[in-house]
Image (cartoon, grey):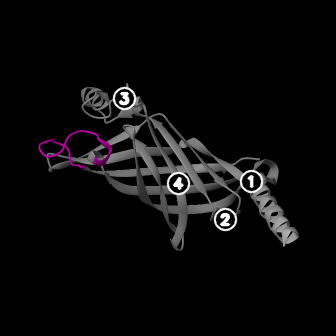
Amino acid sequence: MKNQLKSLVLTAVALFAFSTTYAQTWALDKAHAKVGFTVTHLMLSEVDGYFKTFDAKITAAKPDLSDAVFEFSTDINSIDTGNERRDGDLKGDRWFDAAKYPTMSFKSTSFKKVADNKYKVAGDLTIHGVTKPVTLDATMVGPKQMPGRDGKPGPEKVGFKMTGQIKRTDFGVGGAGAMPVSEEVELRATGEFTKQS
C-alpha cells in the first residue's frame, strides 16, 4: 500500500512538473491591440474610452490554447475619452481614484469553448481595489504560423477579441442613482499574441 501511494504521489509530481515545464508564454503585440469601454451618458448617447497603457500575456501548455490562462493589467492614469476635463474627473476620487488605485487587472480562472471559435473566459477582475468574478465572451482566431523571411516559417500568432458587461458600482466606481453615467459598462479588448520561443 505504501509503495502504491508513493508511486501515485511521484506520478502526480511528474505530471505537474511536465505541464509546468512545457507551458508556453504568448506575448501581446501592443501595436495591434486595444482596450476600451463604453458607457451611456444621461441615458441618451454612448461615450467611448480607451486605456493607452496596458499589457497582457497568455500562458498555455496545449498547442490549441484550450488550457489558456489570461493575465491583463492597465494603467488607469492612461484613460482617454477624447476630453481632457472628463479624463481628469474620471481619474479623481469620485470615480477611479487613480492616485490610490492606479491599476486595473484581470486573471482568468477558466477558458471554455462554446462553439467553433467562441469561448467563455471566467476570471477575477480588480478595479478600484475591489475584486469580483466576471465572465467575458471571447473570439479566437488561430493559432497560425505566420510567413517569415526567405520562405522560412515566421512566428506563431493568435488573435483574440473579448467583450463583457459589468456594473461600475459593484467596484465602487462612482455613485448610483442620480449620476449622469450608466451603471452598466461595456468592456472590450482586442489583440494579437506571439508565441515566445
Figure check: 170 above or below 61:
above
CA separation, marks 4 and 2? 17 Å
Residue positioned 38% across, 57% down in the render: 164
Mark 1 or 2, which is nearer the eye?
Answer: 1
Question: Mark 3 is on which residue type?
Answer: Ala
**Sooner in the amino-acid sequence: mark 3 or mark 2:** 2
Q: Position of residue 33 (x, y in %)?
A: 51, 45
> Mark 3–mark 2 contact, CB under 8 Å?
no
Circle on res. 20: 1
Q: Is residue 127 above or below residue 142?
A: above
Q: Identify the residue at horizontal 61%, vertical 56% (top origin).
A: 158
Disc marking residue 64: 2
Quarter the N terminus occupies:
bottom right
Q: Residues within 10 Å of mark 2 (few under 14, many from 20)?
A: few
Please tell me how crowded label 4 is: few (under 14), some (14-19), or many (20+) other residues with Cα within 10 Å. Answer: many
> Farthest residue in the right direction?
3
Left or right: 156 as drawn, with respect to 97 = right
- Where are the magenta residues, as a range? 170-183
Is 74 colored magenta in this rendering? no
Query: SS for tag 3?
Result: loop
Picture residue at 59% right of the left edge, 43% below the top: 29
Crowd class of label 3 (few under 14; some 14 to 19; many from 20; radius 10 Å): many
Residue 134: numbered disc: none
Q: Say which residue appears at 40% left-offset and 29% top-offset.
A: 77
- Residue highlighted by disc 3: 98
Name the amino acid type tagged 4: Ser
Give yes or no for contact between labels 1 and 2 (Cβ–Cβ under 8 Å). no
Across and down, in percent, residue 45 comes to 19, 48
Q: How many marks?
A: 4
